[in-house]
Amino acid sequence: MLLATWNVNSIKARLENVLSWLKEAGPDVVLLQELKCVDEAFPREPIEDLGYNIAVHGQKTYNGVAILSKFPLEDVVTGLPGAESQPEDDHARYIEAVTGGVRVASIYLPNGNPVPGPKFDYKLGWMDRLVSHAGDLLALEERTVLAGDYNVCPTDADVFDPVRFAGDALCQPESRARFRQILNMGYTEAWRAFHPDGPQEYSYWDYQGGAWDQNNGLRIDHLLLSPQAADCLSRCGIDRGPRAAPKASDHTPVWCELAV
DNA sequence: ATGGCGTTATGGTAACGA
């Protein structure tokens, strides 16, 4: 099973880019973030025509997540569990389903800037809920992949200029500690598992300041695997191709292969 | 330090992103 995550920065603006990458890379399961459209506006037909089933959790203007799969989608959950601890959260940032023998979640974690402030507090509260839910899922002892735009650079090795980003929400100790909590309970971060000591590789490059041309990037899109999923992990990579295309998203797909 | 982009919702600017 080839499984990918991609923050597309508007599915409507990016439809041609997404369709051409689906045809070229042929992933079985794709976790999308930042759809920026309501469920009814999601361009289902052209994607279904490529053989995908679709589950969408959309929202007007901002956020929005989806799961595409060549396998049937079952047990779809929209919204991150634990909302009672964060009743102000009305963002579409989480969708989960079981497909092809794997439980998958598409995650669009809050950015959290500026620090400090209510947006950073929201990020940390949301991460606390994610940690809790990741623990609940771990107890199921299933193959589980929690993937998406985590808006966290796990270490300074994931930042082109750590000094410049020292005050950014993506690099705060509190953000990194919560990300590590998920790893410490037993999840494997797929890309880092294959590259424990580098090289530096990124999944996001700002539109501004020639960031792509200068490779001024961040690695913030991650695939976190339960032990049962990690047992099957055979390959992982970052596909820079889509970032170089015309009208590109500022993120590029990160993928892994599970031998299931 | 902040925005130099880009998208959306708009009908000239503003919010938001990371």
Image (cartoon, rainbow, N blue to C red):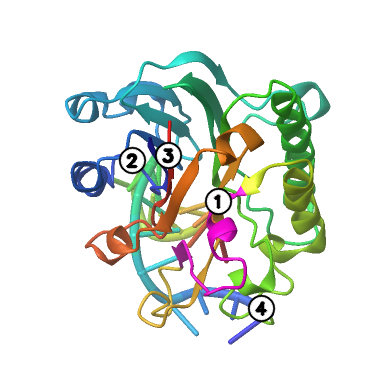
Quarter of the picture containing the C terminus of chain A is: top left
- Mark nearer the N terminus (4 vs 2): 2
- Which chain is home to disc 4? A
> Do the residues marked 1 and 4 share a common chain?
yes
In the rendered structure, which segment of residues is drawn in magenta? A189-205
Q: Mark 4: give few (<14), some (14-19) or many (20+) Cα within 10 Å.
A: some
**Amino acid tagged 3:** Leu
Query: Where on the picture, by quarter, is residue A155?
Result: bottom right
- Which chain is home to disc 1? A
**Amino acid tagged 4:** Pro
Question: Disc number at residue A32?
Answer: 3
Q: CA distance from mark 1 to mark 4?
A: 22 Å
* Residue mark closest to the camera, 3 vs 2: 3
* Residue mark closest to the camera, 4 vs 2: 4
Outermost residue on the top side: it is: A75
Question: Disc number at residue A11?
Answer: 2
The answer to which of A221 and A257 lies nearer the viewer is: A257
| Identity of the residue drawn at 56% across and 18% down | A77
Q: CA distance from mark 1 to mark 3?
A: 18 Å
* Residue mark closest to the camera, 1 vs 4: 1
The answer to which of A120 and A193 lies nearer the viewer is: A193
Query: Where on the picture, by quarter, is residue A4?
Result: top left
Q: CA distance from mark 4 to mark 2?
A: 31 Å
Question: Disc number at residue A190?
Answer: 1
- Say if A22 sits above or below B5 in the image: above
Q: CA distance from mark 4 to mark 3?
A: 27 Å
Quarter of the picture containing the N terminus of chain A is: top left
